[in-house]
Amino acid sequence: MAGATATQADAVPFPSVAWFQRLADLMNADRVKHEHLGYVDCVAQFTVLDGGPGRTPWSVQITFEEFAAVDVREARPADAARADFALEATLGTWRAMIESIAGGGGRPALDQTLNHLSHMGTPVRVVSDDPLRRDLYFRYNQSLQEFVNASSAFRTGFSS
Amino acid sequence: MAPVTRAGAAQPLPPPPTLTEQGLERYETTFRQHYQEWAVILQRNAERLARGQYSLHWLDTDKANWGRRAKPSSRGLTYTDINNVKPYGDMPVEADWRNFTARGSVREPYRHEMPTIEEYTVLDRGEVWADNVITLYEEAKARQWNATRDIPWHELEPLPEDLEKATCQLCTFLTEVEFVAGDFPAKWMYRIPQDFLEVKSFLATQIMDEARHQEVFRKRAIAGGGLMHAAPGFEWALQAILQAPTHTMGTFLLNLLGEGLVLSIFRSGEMIAKTHVDKEIFRRCLQDEARHVSYGVMQFKYYLDTHANREQALEEMHRFADVGEQVILSAFTEPALVESVAVLLGGGLEHIDNGMEGMIKLWSMLIDEYLQRCERAGFPRRGRCTIPQQMPWRAA
């Protein structure tokens, strides 16, 4: 069974560009599902606040266009303005979400959806300097949820 | 001479004409008034047909924009793609075609022979346009969903009674809200002339969105136990939205303020949902709502940016917001809404106090988001907002 584990040799490490690229590949391979959900046009940043070297922040930006994830790249702080919004959380928060998705076979527990985690500003914080660009997170919420839900299709490895 | 009858032998008066009869009579009268003009066209065409002749004037492309073919982009052929073909994208600042003719068609030679639709009264582009309206229209079409098919209704299971009642009460409230959210764009759509066709197209999607929302909340309530209580505070607020004096004022109240708050309720609904069915409902709805909020912000911005007297426009909108915020406040202090959400936030009736603590946080957040959207539109409201930034709640 695929899913989130810390020990599998074939696991894709989290956080990493490779992990998000795998999600992008899965999204692009399942075009029918995403055509049904509709256009997604935004640059979303996922930040793991303690996911970089020495527990520094680590970020990745995913560019969504139409029904596809067309670009995945690691982002430095100077790249922040490129993203329409950023979802920031600790590794522990992301790990709990990913493990919940894996445990639910692609559907997280009620308290582990992106909106649930972010709505009150904690443990996931939605960051944007423009309310219109922040609202893209809401306009495409179902697609973004499906994007991360696809992580149940492969094994995730965590460094700690 | 009419027969004379004595009072005692009077026959019953004939029944008054029904509303249908009255309406039909007015329609016939109007027809007869207009018929003089119609008849000229009718006679000309009928005589030509009788002579066995063709007009073929429509083949003349001298005054047409013939041959400039629109090219599809990666998504197909969008309004943006066809508007890139000159002059089809040229939109008047003030619409003066108050009929059904298509922008960019050969219509000037026929102007004097065509009717004026008196109901088209919103002629100022500043009252309706938003720079994102075409994008939102395309997105709305692409992100439609089906409340019958796309919600996993078969997974719906009964909740504990207090949570089920709270969920059904929230859905009852939202059903009321969605009725006005559909009626407002419908009311204005038919007042907007065809030259602003992109706006009318977007409003049509909003009407469909709101129809689907009232459908899904009504279904959720009746599938879970039943519809619960209507609330007077809602009704006054909804009436105030529907009766807004201008389209921009109404869309500010409905889309920027009202739907901004409803978007927060939907996000809260997703967060506090006790079933995957409810999660799915709220997640789908919040996406639609965010589009409407986005239109509201950008329509308001366009109105202010293009107004001939920005200071005057700002002051009028402040005056309107002073009232509008109060009517929205009356909705968002109704126990049928506040208490049902608090019960769901707290996890049950016995934890309603905990839920109210959550409501206090939500309140501050949603007022701040409202003020941010105002600022984004160019409307500095932070120092004048009449809604308290802290929820008026004192724990017992």
Image (cartoon, helix red, strand yellow):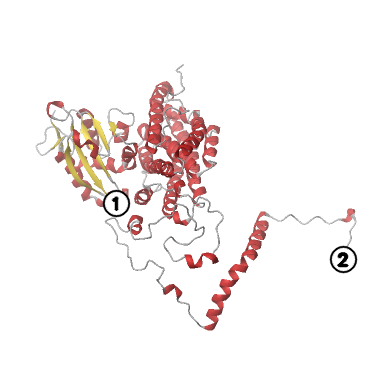
The image position of residue B270, as x and y in percent, is 36, 35
- Disc 2 marks a residue whose amino acid type is Met
Name which residue lies at 26% across and 35% down. A86
Q: How many marks?
A: 2
- Disc 1 marks a residue whose amino acid type is Glu
Residue of label 1:
A35
Q: Is residue B6 above or below residue A119?
A: below
The image's mark for residue B1 is 2
Q: Is residue A41 above or below residue A78?
A: below
The image position of residue B214, as x and y in percent, is 46, 43
Say which of A8 and B339 sits in front: B339
Relative to residue B306, is residue A5 drawn left or right?
left
Say which of A130 and B5 sits in front: A130
Name which residue lies at 22% across and 32% down. A94
Few, some or many residues within 10 Å of mark 1 (<14, 14–19, 20+) = some
Relative to residue A75, is residue B237 drawn left or right?
right
The reply to whether callout 2 and callout 1 are in contact (CB within 8 Å) is: no
Callout 1: SS = helix
Callout 2: SS = loop
